[in-house]
Image (cartoon, rainbow, N blue to C red):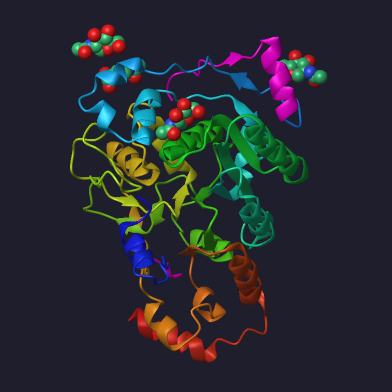
Amino acid sequence: MRSTKARFFFMAGALGLLVFHLSKDSDQPKTVQLNTDVKEIRIHKSLSIKNYSYVYSWPKCQQNITANNITGFTTLPQNIQDFLYYQHCRHFPMLLDLPEKCGGAYESNKVFLLLVIKSSPHNYDRREVLRKTWAKERMHNGVWIRRVFISGTTGEGYEKERLNKMLELEQREFSDILQWDFSDTFYNLTLKQTLFLEWMERNCPKARFLFNGDDDVFANTDNMVVYLQSLNDNDGSKHLFTGHLIANVGPIRAAGSKYFIPVQVQESNLYPPYCGGGGFLLSGFTGMIIYRMSKSIPFLPIDDVYMGMCLAKAGLGPASHIGVRTAGLHIAAVTSDAYDPCFYKDILLVHRFLPGQIYLMWNRIQDPDLDCSSSRTQLHDNKL
Ligand SMILES: *[C@@H]1O[C@H](CO)[C@@H](O)[C@H](O)[C@H]1NC(C)=O
Ligand SMILES: *[C@@H]1O[C@H](CO)[C@@H](O)[C@H](O)[C@H]1NC(C)=O
Ligand SMILES: *[C@@H]1O[C@H](CO)[C@@H](O)[C@H](O)[C@H]1NC(C)=O
Ligand SMILES: *[C@@H]1O[C@H](CO)[C@@H](O)[C@H](O)[C@H]1NC(C)=O
């Protein structure tokens, strides 16, 4: 469930906004096998740019036929059936890896903010614009920002090959893609998230903070750095998980919904509190705790709720930033340009931006001549 409230606003035809204002406020060893199968190696070589010695292969995960026995199985939608058949599959071979992204596991504390962006293969235009705007790898305020897109595969046959080839080309130029050989569908996002955390434990365990989000958001990463630096008692080694907090909601039982969760998948009518998956911030510490917890929690196909379940199991909770306003820009939008950069200078994240809008907004808020003396007042009024 991306965000119940935000979806409501989309349906209402308004701009769904997650507005965060800047204010103070393992366990078991991995049973990986080094791939020694010649054919497999050939496949990996054709798909990856460098012959990393880190290419692992897992035995192909088998469909769980016994899922057929679940009451009412045949009446469930195909994607839920797929979920139940493959829910237990947690390891997939990597097609594109970046073991040196954080300078190696031991040096990874030099990465202050790792941007982890869920992107499916065909979203080339989104990745392209993010690379030159808010997800640019750079030093800001004296600390490093790094970027990875996380992806599975889509399509079959030639289409799948073409898309993989495109990611391979992007990797060659930008070195910013982690790709696993699983089907990149909505109900596999929890799998994608967990595969990322597994990668992080191996390659970037000491990154201070993570921004975890979608490729269709406008994220003010400069502000994120400033906000995270203002947490005087947390350098990433303590709990932090903050975003658009959603509490007291439960599974949607309507079979037609994108977020449909039948009782066969989850019986309880209540989800634990969680942060909407469009984008949230967490510490490296919390990321590693979530990963550890995930090992003993069966997957729920809604990724952001699943994060909340892992937190709950660890006795931790998600937080809402004190300045979060989900409807903060609505009133302003009626009387003025909803894309006035002054409204976006102070926020951390806004959901649903098109690539062109991201390009324009990022450049406008960087403009040293931007004068927000009048519009700023307006935004502050809305916040009261
Ligand atoms: C590719 O990686 C494998 C496994 O680490 C290694 O044995 C092999 O020599 C490498 N091949 C090349 C061409 O570097
Ligand atoms: C469950 O599924 C298995 C394998 O398909 C089958 O052999 C078995 O009879 C089923 N059990 C029940 C209780 O239906
Ligand atoms: C297969 O599905 C059945 C029915 O949901 C479940 O009881 C069993 O634990 C599953 N097996 C695996 C390996 O996940
Ligand atoms: C998740 O990915 C696996 C591997 O590609 C696939 O077999 C399964 O059907 C996918 N699950 C869903 C719910 O799409």
Is residue 263 shown to the viewer in this render?
Answer: yes
Q: Position of residue 164 (x, y in %)?
A: 67, 35
Q: Residue at x 43, y 23 (%)?
A: 89
Find residue 62 and report its horizontal and vertical position in percent: 44, 16
Question: What's drawn in magenta, residue-wise?
Answer: 20-47
Quadrant location of the C terminus in the rendered image: bottom left
Q: Residue at x 55, y 32 (%)?
A: 199
Foreground pick, 66 / 173: 66
In x, y percent, where is residue 289? 40, 36
Does residue 296 sit above or below 376 in this rendering? above
Does residue 98 appear in the picture of this structure? no
Name the residue at 37% across, 24% down.
85
Within the image, what quadrant is residue 308 found in?
top left
Instruction: Answer above or below: position of 55 versus 14.
Output: above
User: 230 or 94: nearer the eye?
Assistant: 94
The single residue placed furthest to the bottom in the displayed view is: 374
In the displayed structure, would residue 351 be above or below residue 276? below
Q: How many marks?
A: 0
Residue 78, placed above or below residue 209? above
- Magenta run includes residue 367: no
x, y percentage for residue 139? 68, 57
The residue positioned 67% from the left and 78% from the top of the image is 367
What is the quadrant of residue 377 in the picture?
Answer: bottom left
In this picture, residue 376 sits left or right of residue 155: left
